[in-house]
Amino acid sequence: MEKTIEWIKTGKNSGFSRMIDQIVIPYEYKKVDIKTSDEMYNAIKTMIVRGAPAIGIAGAHGVCLAAIENKDSNNFIEEVKKIAQYINSSRPTAVNLIWAINKQLEILDKNSDKTNEEIIELLVENAIKLEDEDIEINKKIGDFGATIIPKGATIQTHCNAGALATVGYGTALGVVRSAFKNDKTIKVFADETRPRQQGARLTTYELIRDGIDTTLITDGMGAYFMKKGMIDVVVVGADRIALNGDSANKIGTYMLAIVAKYHNVPFYIAAPKSTIDPSIKTGDEIVIELRNKEEVTIINDKPIATDKVNVINPGFDVTPNELITGIITEYGIFKPSEIYKLFE
Ligand code: MRU
């Protein structure tokens, strides 16, 4: 399986991060090599790499780059930690970013008696381990999730929680992939996901490539198709889940969950344990990223509205736990109100 993001080792204490450029899909398919911590900050911020688990790995790689840049520093650990905080500030909502950065900072703290060179090797080893674990975790999520997909079902998705949002396989689309292994008749309705169209550009791209029957709909069409009985289940990803099960995901998820509840369509979140933030009790504590006006007013370099109009562009919303049928994790499927049990 090709990795969306991977560390390329070029020798002892040298290497870089290679990632699929998600800005240019579907016009172009190319990889970008990220060789400095500054470039990593920009790659996450501009969404060359996006999706909670993928930006977590990008954060882990960013710490490796920071360590390589400071190899000869007498203040090695402090310098690397400072850059790690900077990289973490690139996008605030997905908890996987700080989760993976913290995994790297633990390595720094536990090995402070070692040489800078030895620590760099341990950071790289850990980053590659996190990459491989991500794929394994997604396959487990997929296999648990496949058990709730009825035969021949039509699954609605939102945004892209696929192979491109992770190192490989995907979370919500991992559920689709696992279900498809046993049942070639399942179908996906992918909504386009304004403003950045991750559904249209990325989800349909990867599902069609896998031969899965995929229909693209606009964001406002979900209720229409649910009323007609054409959607059997909704499965989406998450960027941060509170201990009570409230789940932040791409803007529009909350509206889709309300529509699903109204039409008695089961609504599932698929996410790894690393997306659950045990430090927050409810979704009210989740910081929502505000993005720029141009994402809304410009499509394909052409303005679609007067530039005098006001725009507010929150990147995410929080779906309250009562709208969520279940949270599919690598440890099984949990009622939102019981997700805290993963931390007991
Ligand atoms: O702004 P994005 O594209 O990074 O948002 C991505 C999402 O909202 C995904 O659904 C979420 O990160 C889960 S990815 C497995």
Image (tube, rainbow, N blue to C red):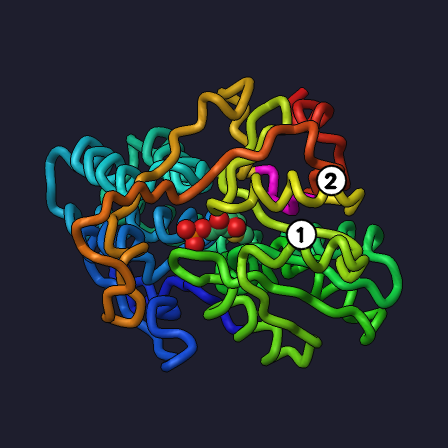
- Which quarter of the picture shows residue 90? top left
Residue shown at 73% from the left, 39% from the top:
261
Return the residue at label 1: 223
31 magenta-colored: no
Task: Identify the residue at horizontal 58%, vertical 66% (top origin).
Answer: 217
**Residue at the location (78% across, 59% down)?**
228
Q: Position of residue 237 (x, y in %)?
A: 58, 48
Which residue is more in the foreground, 259 or 154? 259
Q: Amino acid at mark 1?
A: Ala
Q: Is residue 226 above or below residue 327?
A: below
Q: Secondary structure at mark 2?
A: helix
Disc 2 crowd rating (10 Å Cα; few below 14, some 14-19, many 20+) is few
Query: How many neighbours does mark 1 have within 10 angstroms: few (below 14), some (14-19), or many (20 or more)?
Result: some
Observer able to see residue 189: yes
Rendered view: 65 above or below 86: below
Residue 189: image quadrant is: bottom right
Left/right of residue 87 with respect to residue 237 in the rendered view? left
Q: Which residue is mark 2?
A: 262
Tell which of 311 and 250 is nearer to you. Answer: 311
- Between disc 1 and disc 2, whose residue precedes? 1
In the rendered image, which quarter contains the C terminus?
A: top right
Are the residues at dot 1 and dot 2 in contact (C-beta closer than 8 Å)?
yes
Real-space Cα separation, disc 1 to disc 2, in angstroms: 9 Å
Image mark count: 2
> Mark 1 falls on what kind of element?
helix
- The label on residue 48 is none
Q: Position of residue 81 (x, y in %)?
A: 24, 34
Numbered range of the magenta stretch: 268-273
